[in-house]
Image (cartoon, helix red, strand yellow):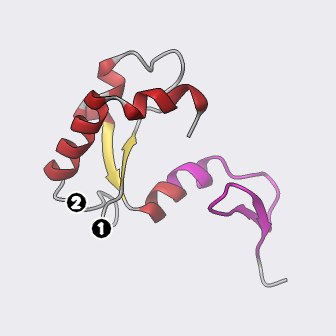
C-alpha cells in the first residue's frame, strides 16, 4: 500500500463502502468467481484523486477480486521487461522458469 493511501483505507467511509460492495458482489471475485478478498479500485488511487469520492467510494470504480486476480492486475501490468523473473508476495523480484 502506498504511504499516501494508508490514512484513506482506515477511514470509516471506506470501510463501510468496502463492506457494502463486498456484500453487493456476494463475496465472489468478479473475474474468476472464486472467493473475493480485495475491493480493488479500477482507476487507481493517486495523490491527486484520493480526495475525490467518485474515484474512491463509487461502486462504478470498484471491483471485488480474489488475491490471485488482484496480483495479476498489479503485477502483470507492471511486470519487468526482463523475462524469467516475477514479483513474489513481498513485491521482491524472484527468478522463475525451473532454475
Asked if the stretch drawn in magenta spans residue 94, the answer is yes
Q: Do the residues bearing badges 1 and 2 touch, measured as CB atoms within 8 Å?
A: yes
Q: Nearer the viewer, residue 89 or 78?
A: 89
As drawn, is 78 to the left or to the right of 69?
A: right
**Quick check: 33 left or right of 96?**
left
On residue 35, the disc is 1
- What's the residue at 51%, 52% (across, down)? 73
Q: Is residue 80 left or right of residue 8?
A: right
Quadrant of res 88:
bottom right
- Range drawn in magenta: 72-96
| Residue 32 placement (x, y as % from top left) | 33, 66
Residue 96 % position (x, y): 76, 74
Report how many numbered discs are placed on residues in the image: 2
Tag of residue 17: none
The quarter of the rendered structure image containing the N terminus is: top right
Front residue of 1 and 34: 1
Q: Earlier in the sequence, mark 1 or mark 2?
A: 2
Figure check: 15 above or below 54: below
Mark 1 → mark 2, Cα distance in angstroms: 6 Å
Residue displayed at 47% across by 65% down: 68
Q: Is residue 78 above or below residue 53?
A: below
Q: Which residue matches tag 2? A: 27
- Location of residue 18 by image quarter: top left
The residue lying at 25 percent from left, 33 percent from top is: 60
Q: Classify mark 2: residues with Cα within 10 Å, few (<14), some (14-19) or many (20+).
A: many
Could you say which quadrant of the image residue 90 lies in?
Answer: bottom right
Task: Check the image and name the residue furthest to the bottom.
Answer: 98
Q: SS for tag 1? A: loop
**What percent of the width, then of the height, locates residue 50?**
44, 20
Residue at figure coordinates x 22%, y 45% from the top left: 19
Give percent across and percent down for residue 10.
39, 33
Amino acid at each position: 500500500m502506498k504511504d499516501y493511501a494508508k490514512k484513506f483505507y482506515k477511514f470509516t467511509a471506506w470501510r463501510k463502502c468496502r463492506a457494502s460492495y463486498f456484500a453487493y458482489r456476494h463475496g465472489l471475485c468478479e473475474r474468476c468467481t472464486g472467493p473475493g478478498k480485495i475491493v480493488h479500485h479500477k482507476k487507481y488511487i493517486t495523490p491527486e484523486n484520493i480526495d475525490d469520492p467518485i474515484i474512491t467510494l463509487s461502486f462504478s470504480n470498484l471491483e471485488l477480486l480474489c488475491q490471485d486476480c488482484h496480483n495479476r492486475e498489479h503485477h502483470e501490468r507492471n511486470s519487468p521487461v526482463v523475462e524469467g523473473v516475477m514479483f513474489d508476495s513481498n513485491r521482491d523480484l524472484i527468478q522463475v522458469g525451473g532454475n
